[in-house]
């Protein structure tokens, strides 16, 4: 028989620390530590995120049944020792650097966690209530248990957990059984990260840039990758040729042999991107998609399951996700919106609830993530008090008037900061902490990238579309509330290209208007679609509805409310500071509306240098 069970999940000490609270099987709250500390990908103990989760639930740590950490440090240390022993004496400098950190912090993580938790609540009993999950089990649990499926195959792909880099599981009811694993050092996530590094982007941060760069190139190096770097079997299992990689024993992802293979040294960060980098991005994207599709096909054949759940950092590759869906081996797929390490906090908590405590599970028809709106919310009075203290000049409007004013701003081609309701959990802004704009504008992508986000010009933007209108605009026949599926713009919404422009290459392709919504149409006619549902975000849905009534278009540009290198904004103050440091035109926070031209000029700031570029 079920009983009330309260579990706090924690992920920390690698990247994207987070906390999540599950109360009797319901995900009550979840947040990443970076949103509070303003340090992107903060890996420290998530003290602020924990305190938020507890406050949201009205609980103290002492009220919880369990606190669970998302992986097992001793197994990770075992991998570290075995790896360095196998390659010794190669890699000694790297080992020498890592060992003191492990001895000081990670080998005694139980004691460290107990100390940190008792600093929050000295009544917390860490001896009997502190548990440890396995990394890939946490990912798999985060994918299956919140999913809308009663049973499903579960595929987890990331860099590495303790040992596993890829795992196949099957979930049924409240059970989850891991069937197969691929272990370190053979990792699709690390392969993709190696190319991220090679293309001059930051590992564990810039992988989505590599994916965004891929459509500008041609996969001319794909065979070279298959022939030299990765041996892919028919079932999708694979092995890497470690002779080309450095991550076993050095601080570089790749070595000189890797660079000689492609005839090009690693691009230095912030240096120009040339066509070869685009072709390399296209090539590793093609190989990644091949592996993921082969894995998904073999899973379908071996398990007979008609539904698939995905988690792990590689599951954020929304281009590959869209191709798995269109491949047709599964009736439907569901991807954990916080698929990376942050989502491990939710998975660990749900694993304790269902697997450790054997509590029952009933699949929620939509899903159990509440639209991923699991973070802090601010009352209207609190918003006004905070804005006043920050020196903001604003007008508070009736709710419907706020929406019509915001709509008018969008129709006037202004970039609008949109700060509403509970903050999203995961890497995507979903209409709670977003910057939105008119998708019909041919100049909006450039304006947002260069003047608002301060980031590379090639970076694509995603469309938010009314769920009920999605099929009219995009080749997608199902919900995509978490912006984790890529689909093509419908033929009826495409525009013919002028004669002679088929010769355009590289970033010159950006100059061509391909559809009625050019600001969100990538150069291959694809878009990373977010369907907006009245049930989960009524205010954002209403904004889109009013914009459609004015323009006939139910699509807006939606990008995260931050600048390059900054975490997504969390508080009204964060939003105001970002607003004042960019060329954003207007800002709607709750029912308060701000115009840039009405603000105190003394509060304008040079914002783009405040954060380290990611």
Image (cartoon, rainbow, N blue to C red):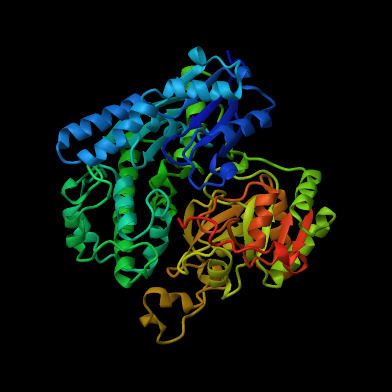
Residue 163 in view:
no
Q: Position of residue 241 (x, y in %)?
A: 18, 47
Q: Position of residue 393 (x, y in %)?
A: 79, 60
Q: Residue furthest bottom?
A: 499
Q: Position of residue 126 (x, y in %)?
A: 51, 16
Total numbered labels placed on residues in the image = 0
Q: Is residue 274 left or right of residue 315?
A: left
Vertical side of 553 occupied by 420: above or below: above
Vertical side of 295 occupied by 200: above or below: below
Name the residue rendered at 67%, 24% in the picture.
59
Q: Is residue 407 left or right of residue 253?
A: right
Q: Residue furthest right?
A: 398
Q: Position of residue 6 (x, y in %)?
A: 59, 21
Name the residue rendered at 53%, 73% in the picture.
515
- The front one of 288 and 548 is 288
Tell me the quadrant of the picture where the N terminus can be found: top right
- The front one of 547 and 478 is 547
Q: Is residue 353 left or right of residue 54?
A: left
Name the residue rendered at 51%, 58% in the picture.
564
Vertical side of 56 occupied by 132: above or below: above
Tell me the quadrant of the picture where the C terminus can be found: bottom left
- The front one of 596 and 209 is 596
Residue 546 in view:
yes
């Amino acid at each position: 028989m079920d009983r009330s069970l309260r579990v706090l999940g924690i992920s920390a000490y690698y990247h994207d620390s987070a906390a999540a609270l599950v109360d009797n099987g319901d995900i009550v709250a979840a947040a990443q530590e970076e949103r509070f500390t303003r340090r992107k990908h903060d890996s420290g103990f998530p003290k602020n995120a924990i305190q938020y989760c507890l406050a949201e639930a009205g609980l103290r740590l002492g009220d919880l049944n369990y606190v669970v950490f998302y992986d097992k440090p001793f197994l990770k240390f075992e991998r570290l020792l075995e790896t360095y022993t196998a390659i010794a004496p190669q890699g000694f400098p790297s080992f020498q650097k890592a060992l003191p950190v492990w001895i000081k912090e990670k080998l005694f993580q139980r004691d460290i966690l107990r100390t940190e938790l008792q600093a929050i609540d000295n009544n917390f009993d860490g001896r009997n209530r502190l548990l440890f999950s396995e990394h890939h089990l946490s990912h798999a649990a985060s994918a299956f248990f919140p999913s809308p499926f009663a049973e499903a195959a579960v595929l987890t792909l990331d860099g590495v957990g303790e040992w596993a880099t890829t795992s196949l599981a099957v979930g049924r009811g409240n059970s989850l059984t891991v069937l197969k694993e691929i272990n370190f050092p053979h990792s699709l996530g690390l392969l993709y990260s190696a190319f991220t590094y090679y293309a001059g982007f930051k590992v564990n941060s810039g992988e989505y840039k590599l994916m965004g760069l891929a459509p500008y190139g041609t996969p001319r190096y794909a065979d070279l990758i298959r022939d030299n770097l990765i041996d892919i079997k028919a079932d999708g299992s694979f092995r890497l040729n470690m002779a080309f990689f450095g991550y076993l024993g050095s601080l570089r992802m790749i070595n000189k042999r890797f660079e000689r293979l492609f005839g090009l040294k690693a691009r230095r960060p912030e240096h120009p991107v040339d066509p070869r980098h685009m072709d390399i991005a296209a090539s590793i994207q093609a190989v990644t998609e091949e592996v993921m599709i082969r894995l998904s096909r073999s899973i379908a054949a071996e398990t007979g399951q008609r539904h698939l759940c995905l988690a792990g950092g590689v599951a954020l590759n929304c281009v590959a996700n869209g191709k798995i869906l269109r491949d047709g081996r599964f009736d439907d797929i569901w991807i954990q919106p916080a698929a990376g390490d942050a989502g491990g906090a939710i998975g660990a908590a749900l694993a304790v609830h269902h697997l450790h405590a054997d509590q029952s599970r009933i699949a929620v028809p939509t899903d159990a993530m509440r639209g991923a709106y699991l973070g802090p919310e601010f009352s209207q009075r609190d918003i006004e008090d905070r804005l006043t203290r920050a020196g903001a000049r604003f007008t508070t409007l009736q709710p419907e008037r706020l929406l019509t004013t915001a709509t008018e701003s969008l129709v006037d081609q202004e970039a609008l900061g949109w700060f509403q309701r509970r903050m999203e959990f995961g890497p995507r802004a979903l209409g709670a902490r977003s910057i939105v704009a008119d998708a019909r504008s041919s100049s909006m992508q450039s304006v947002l990238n260069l003047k608002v986000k301060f980031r590379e010009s090639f970076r694509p933007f995603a469309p938010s579309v009314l769920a009920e209108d999605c099929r009219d605009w995009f080749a997608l026949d199902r919900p995509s509330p978490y912006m984790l599926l890529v689909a093509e713009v419908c033929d009826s919404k495409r525009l013919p290209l002028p004669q002679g422009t088929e010769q355009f290459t590289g970033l010159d392709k950006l100059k061509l208007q391909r559809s009625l919504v050019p600001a969100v149409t990538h150069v291959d006619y694809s878009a990373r679609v977010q369907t907006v549902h009245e049930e989960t975000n009524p205010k954002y849905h209403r904004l889109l509805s009013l914009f459609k009534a004015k323009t006939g278009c139910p699509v807006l540009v939606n990008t995260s409310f931050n600048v390059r290198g900054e975490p997504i904004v969390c508080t009204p103050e964060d939003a105001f500071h970002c607003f004042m440091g960019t060329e954003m035109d207007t800002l709607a926070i709750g029912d308060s509306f701000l115009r840039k031209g009405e603000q105190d000029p003394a509060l304008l700031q040079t914002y783009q240098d405040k954060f380290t570029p990611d």
